Image: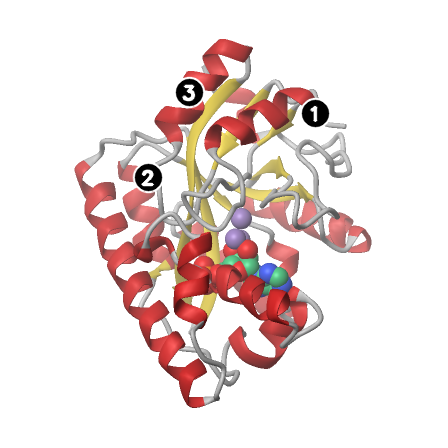
Amino acid sequence: MATIDLHTHSYYSDGALSPEQLVQRAWDCGVKMMALTDHDSTAGLSEAHAVGQRLGVHIIDGLELSTQWQKLNVHVLGLHLQVEHPGLKILLSQQAAARGERARRMAERFEQLGIRGVYDQALALAESPDTLSRQHFAQVLLARGVVHSLQQAFDRYLGDGKKAAVPMPWVTMEEGIAVLLQAGATVVLAHPLRYGMTLTRLLKLLQAFAAAGGQAVEMATATQDAAMIPWLVRQADTLGLKSSQGSDYHGPHMPWVELGQFADMPPSCRPVWSDWP
Ligand code: AMP
Ligand code: MN
Ligand code: MN
Ligand code: MN
């Protein structure tokens, strides 16, 4: 049980809970410091702060930026950022517009596949058209019985190169990191062990991330291969990267993840929050 959880989602991206419900649940789970890190959005932060103040949960302003690196979708967390930074706001509005456009194009693919009306059903789960995520489409496919797990929805329809996938013009990882740094963020590579890369490729990603100014890797998170942690600790050490931790909680519909629940990071790691005010 961790009291610090630096990776969570509300319904301002593909999470199921409102910021208020999320912070309440964090408090119930014993979390004392929580970053709200919605995908490409800071829209839930003010609501999270209001509840955090009431309950005594310290809220960190964050987001999870969708980026591309060598044609792969790589997620970068920005923590402790300036929400009102103009460059950041421009980037987020571009990403939101691209997200909305992709959702419409994915819906067309589903119509062509004979799976009709998914757009409206997905939209009912989302806060707005521009926050529509592949996760929402996966939930619709699961609810309809088209697939029997969220994973299968990605394997068959939504994953890169699959039947309903539409490539996204996300910001490059390097540009994204630059904008986050300008906005004062501490920049963390999200879930490095979940990209399904070979170790050679993952090492290249870590090197590129550090060279671009990235400051930490997510060392402790809910679903990742524990056997790989010693390898990741060594690479982080070599590259001078700190370590972060977070559940990547999305809501009660994914009961295998809970706020504040993940294995401790090894004691030799330098926590990313060590030099925060
Ligand atoms: P998007 O940002 O719209 O491209 O959607 C990506 C989101 O889908 C991620 O943030 C995860 O929440 C979710 N996701 C990605 N891959 C999987 C998977 N294999 N199983 C379940 N959820 C996934
Ligand atoms: Mn997500
Ligand atoms: Mn992610
Ligand atoms: Mn996430």
Left or right: where does residue 28 sit relative to residue 175?
right
Residue 230 shown left or right of residue 137 in the figure: right
x and y percentages locating residue 221 in the rendered image: 67, 44
Q: Residues within 10 Å of mark 2 (few under 14, many from 20)?
A: many
Given the image, on which type of amino acid does mark 2 rest? Leu
Q: Which residue is mark 1?
A: 29
Relative to the observer, which residue lies in front, 208 or 128?
Answer: 128
Q: Residue 169, relative to residue 74: is it above or below?
A: below
Where 115 sits versus 103, above or below? Answer: below
Amino acid at dot 3: His
Q: Nearer the viewer, residue 209 or 36?
A: 36
Residue 7, located in which quarter of the rendered image?
top right
Query: Cα distance, mark 2 to mark 1?
Result: 31 Å
Which residue is tagged 3? 49
**Can residue 274 be seen in this snapshot?**
yes
The residues tagged by marks 3 and 1 sit, at their Cα atoms, a distance apart of 18 Å
| Mark positioned earlier in the residue sequence (3 or 1) | 1
The answer to whether the beta carbon of the residue marked 3 is less than 8 Å from any atom of ligand 4 is no
Q: Which residue is mark 2?
A: 181
